[in-house]
Structures are given as C-alpha cells and as structure tokens.
Amino acid sequence: METEKYQLGKVAVIGGGSWATALAKLLMRNCDRIVWYMHRQDRIDDFIRFRHNPVYLSDVAFDIERIDFTSDINEACREADTLVVAVPSPYFKGIADGITEDISGKFIVSAVKGIVPDDNMIVTDYFASKFGCKDERLMVIGGPCHAEEVALERLSYLTIGCHNTGYSRQFASLIAGGRLKTIISSDVAGIEYGAVLKNVYAIAGGIVNGMKAGDNFMAMLVCNAIREMRRFVDAISPMPDRDIDRSAYLGDLLVTAYSKFSRNHNFGSMIGKGYSVKAAMMEMAMVAEGYYGTKCIYEINESTVKVEMPILNCIYSILYNGASARLAIDRITDTFS
C-alpha cells in the first residue's frame, strides 16, 4: 500500500463543487494530506472557518489541518503529482487554460462528466493534446455514483478507467473502502463518452417524467437510450470487448435518468412541466451538464460519427431550436423498439 501511494504521490483535487467535495472526502481516508484548489478564495476562507464546504455537501466535515488549500491552479499543479479534476465542463477550459506549469508527467484523473465545449473533445484527449500528458497516466472516474449518496455513506460503486490497469488499481486503493467499492476498466474513451450521453438521456427522462408520460414509456426511453449510446460509443471509439451493460454505461444511465439527485433529470423535468429552457436553467442551483453535452455530441455526430440518434436529436431540438417538448417526444415514439 505504501508503495502504491508513493507512485501516485501527493494528490490535488481541482474543483469546489459537490463531486469534488465527495472525492476529497474519499481520498482523505487513505491520503495523509491533499492539496485542494478552489477558484474563489472567499469559499476557501469559509471552508476553513466552518470546517466544511459552505456551499456543497455542507454536512460533510473535514480535517482541514490535512488540507493545503489554494486558489492558484499553478500552485496546485506544482505541489501535487496526481490531479483529480472535478469541475463542471463549462468551466473546465477556463481553469485548464490557466495552467502554465509543465504537467506532462503528472497523473491526471478526470471526474468531469462532460466534453470540453467548443473543442468537442473529451477531457483526457484535451490533456493529452494541450499539455502532452501521457495516455497511460490519464484516468477517468465513471459511475454509477451520485456525490450526495457518497456523502451519506450509502453503498456506492465507481469505475476507474485507465490504459494502465496498474495505475487505475493504485488510484482505486486511495478511494475504496467503507461503503465505496471500485471497478477497474481500460475503456477510457468509452467511459467518458458514456458519462456525457447519460446526462443527455437523463434530461430526456426528466422531460418524460415532467410530462407524466408514465413508467411504461420511461422504460422504453431508457431501453432505446442504451442502444443509442452503444451505437455512438462503438463508432467513435471501437473496442471489441466493450460490454454496454456494465455499470459505467447502463448503470450510470439508470441512476442519472431516474434519481432525484440527478440535476439533469430535474432540469428535464422542469421542461416537461412547461418551463422554458432558459427558465429551467435559471432555476437550477447547479450546472446541468447534459445541456452542454447535448450540443457537443450533436455536433460530433453530425460532422464525424453519423450514427442514428433520434433521442439525442430530439433533445437538441428542444434545448437549442425551441421545439415543443411534447411534440418532439411524440415524434420519436415510433422509432422505439
């Protein structure tokens, strides 16, 4: 165990939201100290004063004497050997582009459940392209797992994806234990794209729920969504032994599509109840990743992948073209099987 910790070195959490907070709590069970970057110094000051995150998962207490807080992203990069990146995708590029330190030899663990906007790249590809990070040191965290249930210490599972399974097992050893179990995978791109798509389908599920379309139709929606996910992921990142029924794909889709903790489901539910997209976004206290992911995946599919994706196209038409949610959903019902 000590050898494994040494190889990954000191860990920094990048982000101050609910997912970053949950991951930091997991890491502190097995790490002597962590570095924690938050963009806003006032949030750090309040965290130190109250000994918990003042905005997200505020019931979770921390031993702040074991945390080196910083609002300087480059200080976090200098001090740590492993960067656990857990920021909403719309803010990711603004933070990443502020990095001037050489991080090409660092371990990067992406917990970003979205695509880099405008670039339409998954986060691990962005780190490889922009910073020269090595593929075998790029990892991704997949679900099914809500930050809120981790905080409540309910039995939860995370999938750690990395081309080097030795490194993924080492990182898993830093977060596993108690009520948190880990699964190892080598399907980095598949897990990342799946994490984006399940947010899109969670919006669809929320819309159906908000419209009170019923459990029968919801089951058909999810059944067709997982097939749509498989078509896209298999086309953009072929992998012969990928099993789309595994927890990182189907499991993550199910928990996001149905759960009351899913901000994407709740966002969609408001639209299904008659909220405009703009009003629903203003009502949300946190970022609905699926809103941004819908546009990114739509553009990738239209320009490159070109597979049949009626659910994605439906949600895109609602979110970006002003289509009626009820009419758009009705139009795709005959495509289901």
Image (cartoon, rainbow, N blue to C red):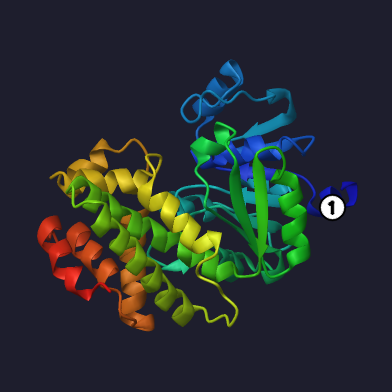
What residue lies at 73% left-to-right and 35% top-to-bottom? 29
Please determine whether, in this image, residue 35 is positioned above or below residue 295: above
Reading the image, the residue beneath label 1 is 4
What residue lies at 49% left-to-right and 36% top-to-bottom? 148
**Image location (x, y in percent) of residue 244:** 50, 70
**Image location (x, y in percent) of residue 225:** 35, 66
What residue lies at 18% left-to-right and 41% top-to-bottom? 279
**Image location (x, y in percent) of residue 311:** 27, 67
**Along the viewing direction, whichever of 13 and 310 lies nearer the viewer:** 310
Furthest-front residue in this view: 216
**Quarter of the image that includes the C terminus:** bottom left
> For the residue carrying disc 1, how many other residues have a C-alpha within 10 Å: few (<14), some (14-19), or many (20+)?
some
- Whether residue 122 appears in this view of the structure is no
Furthest-top residue in this view: 49
Please determine whether, in this image, residue 53 is positioned above or below residue 254: above
**Image location (x, y in percent) of residue 232:** 41, 76
Q: How many marks?
A: 1
Residue 156 falls in image quadrant? top right
Q: Could you say whether the residue bearing mark 1 is in a helix, strand or loop?
A: helix
Please determine whether, in this image, residue 204 is positioned above or below residue 41: below
Q: Horizontal placement of 328 versus 125: left or right?
A: left
What residue lies at 63% left-to-right and 38% top-to-bottom? 24
- Whether residue 246 appears in this view of the structure is yes
Q: Horizontal placement of 221 versus 168: left or right?
A: left
Residue type at numbered disc 1 = Glu
